[in-house]
Amino acid sequence: MTSKTHSKQISIAIIGAGISGLSCATRLQKLGFEVEVYEKSRGVSGRMSTRNGDGWNADHGAQYFTARDPLFIEELNHWIQSEAASIWNPCLKVYKQGQWHDSISSENRYVGTPNMTAPEKFLARNLSIQLNQTIDQIAIKKGKWSLHSIEGGDIQKKFDWLVLALPAPQALALTQQMDLKIKGWVSNANMQGCWTVIVSPNQNLNTDFDAAFVNNEIISWISRNNSKPNRIGREVWIIHANPQWSQEWIELDRDAAAKLILDCAKKLGLDFGNSKVSIHRWRYASGHVNPASGPIINQDLRLGFCGDWLRGGRVEGAWLSGYELASQIEILQK
Ligand SMILES: Cc1cc2nc3c(=O)[nH]c(=O)nc-3n(C[C@H](O)[C@H](O)[C@H](O)COP(=O)(O)OP(=O)(O)OC[C@H]3O[C@@H](n4cnc5c(N)ncnc54)[C@H](O)[C@@H]3O)c2cc1C
C-alpha cells in the first residue's frame, strides 16, 4: 500500500495505544495524515500485555488470537515475517461436568513472540506516541480538538480529528458531557472484568496439557505460558477466572480472590502449594455490542470510536475496527 500526502495535512489525535489505536494510527499515517497517539501506561499494548516477574514473564491479558478476516490474515503475515508473532499449538484440554477431555478444536491460534506485546511494538515502531499521558478532558473549539492530561496538563497541539481507541466505559467517561449517543452503545457492550492469577510454581507441574478451557467453575482458562513459542525463563501458569464470577467479585480483596481461584485450580488437579502468586484485576476485560457495529463516527465533531467492543470483543476485531475507522476517515476527508 502506498502512502499519500494530504495537501493540507490533517492532524489526528488517538487516545489509547492498544491494538485498535495502533492499527488506526498506522493506517492513518500510511494514508498521509499526521498522527499523534496518547497512552496512559508506560508502554504500548493495552490488554495484550505481559507481566515480568522474578525469572519469568507471562502474558496475563489476551492469551492468543485467531485470524479469519483476509485483511487481518495479511497483517498477521507481516508480523510473522518480522518474527513478532507465531502460531501456538498447545496440547489443549477441556474440563466439562467434572471430566477432562481432549479439545476437538482445530482452529489456528497465534501469539506475539517473544511475548504478547510484540505485535504492538512492531506497529508502534514508526509512530509518534506520548506515553504516561492519561487524557482526562477533551474539548472542541472552532473545529479543533484540544486535550488535557493528568500528568502534563494542557496539550499544546490542537487536532482536526479525535479518535478514542478505548474500552467502552473509558470512552464514555471522556465524552459523557457531550451530547452523543455513546451511552446506549456503552451499556450494550456490557463489559466485564477478569481476575487473573499468575503462578510460577516452586517445582514444574506435571500435567498432560498446556492449556485448558474450564466450564462451570470459577476458573474459565488455564495455560502454561512457557508452552508458547520463544518463551524463556521459569515455568509460569496463567489462570483466568470466568467473566461473570470476576464481575460479581470485582471489588474482592486481591488475596481473597487469589485464594478462591487457587482452591478451584487445586480441585481440578493443579496444586500450586505455597508457590508465589501475582494477581491482576482487569476492570474491563471483555464485552462487546451485539451485533457488532464496527467503528462509530460523529462526522460533525470529527470524532471516531474504535476498539474490540465495537467488533466482537477480541484481538482480531480490535485491529479491524481501528483499520476500518482510518479508512472511513480517509473517505470523509476526500
Ligand atoms: C484477561 C483477558 C484475556 C483475554 N483473552 C483474549 C484471547 O485469548 N483472545 C483474544 O482475541 N482476545 C482476548 N482478550 C481481549 C483482547 O485483549 C482485546 O480484545 C484487545 O486487546 C483490545 O484492544 P483495544 O485496543 O480495543 O483496547 P485496549 O487493549 O484496552 O487498549 C486501550 C488502551 O487505552 C489506554 N487508555 C485507557 N484510558 C486512557 C486514557 N484516559 N488516556 C490515555 N490512554 C488510555 C489503555 O492503557 C490501553 O492501552 C483478552 C483480554 C483480557 C483482559
Image (tube, helix red, strand yellow):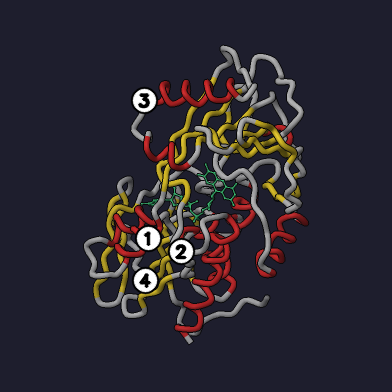
Residue lying at 66% horizontally and 31% vertically, measured from the top left: 99
Task: Identify the residue position indicated by label 2 in the image.
Answer: 290
Q: Residues within 10 Å of mark 3 (few under 14, many from 20)?
A: few
Query: Which residue has dot 3 on it?
Result: 253
Distance of label 2 from label 1 (alpha carbons): 7 Å
Q: Secondary structure at mark 3?
A: loop
**Between 4 and 202, which is closer to the camera in this rendering?**
202
Give the residue at mark 4: 303
* Residue type, label 1: Asn
Quadrant hosting residue 138:
bottom left
Q: CA distance from mark 1 to mark 3?
A: 28 Å
The residue at 62%/34% (across/down) is: 222
Q: Earlier in the sequence, mark 4 or mark 3?
A: 3
Circle number at residue 203: none
Which one is in front, 17 or 91?
91
* Residue to which mark 1 is pinned: 188
Q: Nearer the viewer, mark 4 or mark 2?
A: 2
- What secondary structure is marked by label 1? helix
Q: Position of residue 51 (x, y in %)?
A: 56, 34
Neighbourhood count class around disc 2 (C-alpha, 10 Å): few under 14, some 14–19, many 20 upward: some
Q: Quick check: 161 left or right of 65?
A: left
Label 4: few (<14), some or many (≥20) within 10 Å? some
Residue drawn at the location 75% of the way across and 54% of the way down = 80
